[in-house]
């Protein structure tokens, strides 16, 4: 079996695989236990049973994810760069030498994530770092990524993140100049009221920022032109106008003009402030003063009482057959109908981190039943989305509910991006998850399933 020894494999199945130090990290530490207690308060504020299956270990999982995602507070850039500076003939204090020695060095497309200091939701970062060596030495390229990650693994604001990475590299490498460009992507969750009213809600806020030192300190310096050129010819979008505008704008959706802080559960606010202290932050810091209340306001979207009342008040009467996204003839006087790309937003109950994507629903329309329209199907999706969820359960619940008023022949596909796949140790950027539920004829008719799946458009969810 090559690398997989069969005897060893069966022994591991029986006895389990020992956890690495990384996987066991943080458990039992005072800061972790304090976060666990705070998370229990948050779950109780959502009227959840902290002892139910699925939530029992959530406080520990949340605590470990937060501490892993903010480990930059406990790391020093000096320790990373020290020992990674190498002598290189031809590199001196002059600028503009040829042949790659003394000229610009750029490392592109570093995938990072950070936690937004305004709302505590993770945001994605595509980082590009450049520097001009001097002093007859260069730095190991991996250290540029590691230094950037130190500052990303903290509660952050994009502009400050760029400035801190730039300053840290300049002080530790002592080059002729450092350039940092970040392309940041912040998830924009709608609230319960707006999601039913705004069908064109944009799920992401994008912000490019940059910072420079030495020969890059002046934003109009020629060195920036070289830096941007080395990005553009690899297809990296550079919007200098947006970067200039970003220095004066608040980018977090929770601080937008339409987002108002309302009275929230004070015990939950106190719990979030406790989490900030356990992470090594100061809740009284100016930028964090409103963060606990903003996080609690967002979290309360997943308290399901009001949404249940709205769904239960709907009347499932017979309606005219809608104009579907897809329509093909089927045998037995039934037609296959489909509603594709119904957006959803939800909250993972295992890590209290958001996941989002689209839902595709297929069903059979027979002569004896007039199916309901897209708006009701979207309401069903939102009803089950705005809860503490797992994608597998979400898919099944949508299928069973739609089946109850559309005659039983239903197929549901859910495609989602999970924040927990990037903001924990696994850090699998660009991954997505697809789940499927089939009922009635779709569970036995492989041709019908294939026909529906072939109709799902490509690239239906934002990859970030």
Image (cartoon, rainbow, N blue to C red):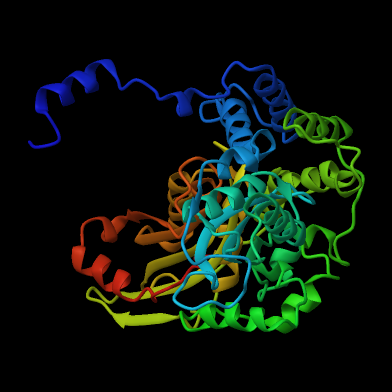
Quarter assignment of residue 176: bottom right
Q: Residue at x 83, y 70 (%)?
A: 249
What x and y, as percent, mark residue 331? 22, 75
What x and y, as percent, mark residue 303? 71, 43
Q: Residue at x 65, y 49 (%)?
A: 172
Q: Is residue 205 above or below residue 110?
A: below
Quarter assignment of residue 37: top right
Residue located farthest toward the left when viewing the structure as drawn: 1
- Image-based side of 47 in relation to 323, left or right: right
Q: Quick one: 328 or 68, which is closer to the camera? A: 68
Q: Quick one: 417 or 410, which is closer to the camera? A: 417
- Image-based side of 253 in relation to 312, left or right: right
Quarter of the image that includes the N terminus: top left
Does residue 382 appear in this view?
yes
Label total for image: 0
Q: Quick one: 393 or 252, which is closer to the camera? A: 252
Does residue 386 appear in this view?
no
What x and y, as percent, mark residue 202? 66, 71
Quarter of the image that includes the C terminus: bottom right
What x and y, as percent, mark residue 218? 77, 76
Q: Residue at x 53, y 24 (%)?
A: 25
Q: Residue at x 65, y 38 (%)?
A: 76
């Amino acid at each position: 079996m090559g690398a997989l020894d069969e005897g060893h494999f069966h022994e591991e199945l029986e006895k389990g695989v020992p956890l690495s130090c990384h996987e066991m990290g943080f458990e039992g530490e005072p800061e972790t236990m304090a976060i666990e207690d705070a998370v229990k308060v948050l779950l109780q504020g959502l009227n959840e049973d902290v002892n139910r299956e699925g939530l029992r270990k959530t406080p520990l999982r949340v605590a470990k994810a937060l501490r892993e995602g903010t480990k930059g507070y406990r790391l020093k850039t000096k320790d990373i760069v020290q020992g990674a500076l190498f002598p290189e003939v031809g590199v001196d204090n002059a600028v503009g030498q040829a042949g790659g020695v003394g000229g610009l060095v750029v490392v592109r497309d570093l995938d990072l994530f950070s936690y937004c200091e305004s709302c505590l939701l993770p945001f994605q970062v595509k980082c590009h770092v450049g520097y001009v060596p001097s002093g007859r030495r260069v730095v190991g390229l991996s250290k540029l990524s590691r230094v950037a990650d130190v500052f990303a693994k903290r509660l952050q604001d994009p502009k400050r993140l760029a400035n801190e990475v730039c300053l840290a590299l300049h002080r530790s490498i002592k080059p002729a100049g450092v350039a940092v460009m970040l392309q940041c992507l912040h998830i924009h969750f709608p609230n319960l009221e707006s999601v039913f009213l705004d069908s064109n809600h944009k799920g992401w806020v994008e912000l490019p920022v940059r910072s420079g030192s030495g020969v890059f300190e002046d934003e109009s310096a020629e060195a920036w032109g070289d830096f941007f050129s080395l990005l553009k010819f690899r297809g990296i979008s550079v919007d200098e106008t947006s970067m200039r505008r970003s220095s004066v704008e608040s980018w977090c959706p929770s601080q937008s003009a339409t987002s108002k802080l309302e009275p929230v559960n004070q015990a939950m606010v106190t719990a979030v402030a406790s989490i900030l202290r356990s992470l090594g932050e100061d809740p009284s810091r100016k930028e964090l003063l409103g963060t606990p209340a903003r996080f609690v306001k967002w979290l309360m979207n997943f308290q399901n009482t009001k949404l249940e009342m709205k769904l239960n008040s709907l009347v499932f009467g017979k309606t005219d057959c809608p104009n579907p996204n897809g329509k093909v003839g089927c045998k037995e006087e039934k037609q296959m109908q489909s509603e594709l790309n119904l957006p959803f937003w939800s909250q993972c109950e295992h890590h209290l981190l958001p996941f989002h994507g689209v839902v595709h629903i297929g069903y059979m329309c027979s002569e004896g039943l007039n199916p309901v329209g897209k708006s009701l199907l979207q309401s069903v999706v939102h009803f089950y989305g705005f809860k503490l969820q797992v994608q597998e359960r979400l898919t099944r619940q949508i299928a069973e509910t739609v089946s109850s008023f559309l005659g039983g022949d239903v197929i549901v596909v859910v495609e989602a991006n999970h924040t927990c796949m990037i903001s924990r140790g696994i850090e699998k950027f660009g991954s997505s998850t697809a789940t499927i539920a089939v009922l009635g004829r779709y569970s036995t008719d492989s041709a019908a399933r294939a026909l529906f799946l072939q109709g799902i458009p490509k690239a239906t969810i934002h990859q970030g």
